[in-house]
Amino acid sequence: MTNDHEVVDQAVVVIAHYRAQEGAEDTVAALLAEYSGLVRAEPGCAAFSAHQAYEDPREFVLCERYRDRTAFDQHCTSPHYLSIARDRIRPLLDRRDVTLYKGTLEP
């Protein structure tokens, strides 16, 4: 079997799904708004956006792209990740599902 696709870059793409605890959705939204600009300012961050669902405002999705695994690892040890994402947002969540993806696939 031949490999008819390859990873053309070393980017790390992250898709995270959050479900806020009942009554915490406005606080989570405000914290994500504060956090987003800080993440986008990281030298290794190519893109970051956070979205709140229309149908269920307790549901959030984060779409992130980092230059490479080193940039992602640096993100996970940044002061804003630790103080906002880990220490302030996570305790307000019922669920947090995070999946890391490889860079862009091309034929």
Image (cartoon, rainbow, N blue to C red):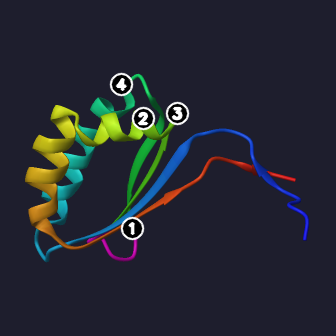
Mark 4 lies on a secondary structure that is loop
Distance between mark 4 and mark 1 Cα atoms: 25 Å
In three-dimensional space, the C-alpha distance between marks 3 and 2, rounded to whole angstroms, equals 8 Å
Q: What segment carries the magenta color?
A: 54-59
Residue in front for this viewpoint, 55 or 98? 98
List x then y, in percent, for residue 84: 14, 45
Q: What is the crowding at mark 3: few (fewer than 14 residues within 10 Å), some, or many (at least 20)? A: some
Q: Which residue is mark 2?
A: 70
Does the magenta stretch mainly form a helix, a strand or a loop? loop
Q: Label 4: few (<14), some or many (≥20) within 10 Å? A: few
Residue tagged by mark 4? 41
Which quadrant would residue 1 be assigned to in this image?
bottom right
> At label 3, which amino acid type do we have?
Arg
Q: Which residue is under mark 1?
A: 53
- Within the image, what quadrant is residue 82 found in? top left
**Residue 81, percent from left and from top:** 21, 42
